[in-house]
Image (spheres, rainbow, N blue to C red):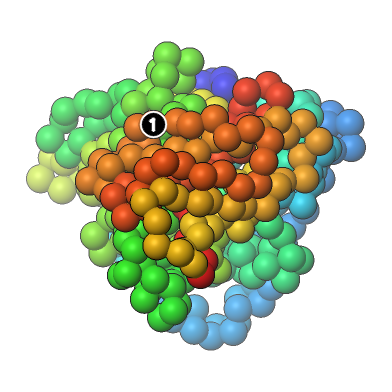
Amino acid sequence: MDPARVEATVRKLVSFGTRHTLSVQDDPARGIGAARDWLLSELRSYAAVSGGRMTAELQSYVQEPASRIPVATKITNVVATLRGSVTPERVYVVSGHYDSRVTDVMDATSDAPGADDDASGVAVVLELARVMAKRRTAATIVFAAVAGEEQGLYGSTHLAEQLKAAGADVQGMFTNDIVGSSTADDGTKDPYTVRLFAEGVPTSETPEQAAIRRSVGGENDSATRQLARFVRDVADNDATGMHVRMIYRRDRYLRGGDHIPFLERAWPAARFTEPAEDFAHQHQDVRVEDGKQYGDLPRFCDFGYITRVARVNAAALWTLAQAPGTPAGAKILTSALTNSTQLVWTRGTEPDLACYEIVWRETTAPEWTHVIPAGDVTAFEVDLSKDNVFFGVRAVNTKGLRSPVAFPLPQS
């Protein structure tokens, strides 16, 4: 990850003046259209050296008048896809949004630099695409710069819907939104922490699923929570130089992000955000008031910090894409009342799949604390009561890489 490239990307996006979703789309130097075309050119340059594994394209649709969209508006995502060489049907997505705004969310003409929100996240996505384009992954990774976030998550909703229509098996999604600064509004700095927002009770939960959860627990064991635990396991270390602070909620108060459309479609998805925001530098007109500078300007970004956030994303995505997929069909058999626990699951299709592990913890513990080798099997009995602890199943390949944990549901 190159901090000079990160800085250049942020400054280039800011140079388009405004990237408001409703701004001009046919000016080569200003507006969201100019930003869109530059992003496509960058991603195509990465794809050109990928040996045919990466493609880059525009993903457009016309949004009819809706909330914060007063007239029919073309919304375009810029998407690069690095196709996996072993299990390409298994997909991981990483995004940032390239649209920007000022105080009035409908102001499409004033300068809206959007350096932190969210040129920083787009810079992360571009660095990941650049570095990974030359490398071969087992699973597929989608790198997306989406539009329409500030108007209501329109671009990410379209991206999620396109993936769903294609039958993609999305096993993890990360959005990087406001990852540009390590300085809080009171001037304190925390340059080595990134927050990871991960919901507990799934956004997509059905009444039937809610009834099971109320019966057996699992509020802290959604697929998204398992994904977040995985991120901290592989990306909170000296290699990234970062601490991943898990936040047990979907997003911040009164806010939302591009992971939500993926959660709505029952896919695990989480949001990376800087540790303490300065609200004078986001969603603000550029101005000086009582000697204080307002506006989302590049001078308030910490490009070394953004680079470390990119490393966290890279560690997580690379390991996810090389490790086995999350086990499917994990169940706890409940046909008989016993003081042991019988677990079953479906064997994965990866050619380098080696074995499975059972993990467990006390119901009051937030993290998995015990590991039991199960072997290359699809059923295992543990001499512990299912009534007393929580269990999980994860896959291991021949290189020792482990999948995220699957939380088993009861099966009578």
Q: Where 289 falls versus 161 (above or below)?
A: above
Residue 305 lies, in percent from the top left, at 39, 26
Residue 147 lies, in percent from the top left, at 56, 60
Residue lying at 39% horizontally and 31% vertically, measured from the top left: 370
Which quarter of the rendering shows the N terminus?
Answer: top right
Compared across the picture, whether 260 is left or right of 219 comes to right
Q: Residue furthest right?
A: 52
Compared across the picture, whether 266 is left or right of 306 comes to right
Under mark 1, the amino acid is: His
- Give whichever of 124, 265 is nearer the camera: 265
Q: Where 111 falls versus 105 (above or below)?
A: above
Residue 349 lies, in percent from the top left, at 77, 45
- Give whichever of 59, 408 is nearer the camera: 408
Residue 150 in sight from this viewpoint: no
| Residue on which the image places disc 1 | 370
Q: Could you say which quadrant of the image residue 233 lies in?
A: top left
Residue 344 in sight from this viewpoint: yes
Residue lying at 30% horizontally and 24% vertically, measured from the top left: 191
Residue lying at 32% horizontally and 55% vertically, measured from the top left: 387
- Secondary structure found at label 1: strand
Residue 237 lies, in percent from the top left, at 42, 19
Q: In the rendered picture of this protein, how many numbered marks are placed on residues?
A: 1
Is the residue marked by circle 1 packed among few (<14), some (14-19), or many (20+) residues within 10 Å? few
Q: Residue furthest top?
A: 238
Q: Where 196 falls versus 37 (above or below)?
A: above
Residue lying at 37% horizontally and 43% vertically, measured from the top left: 384
- Give whichever of 64, 101 is nearer the camera: 64
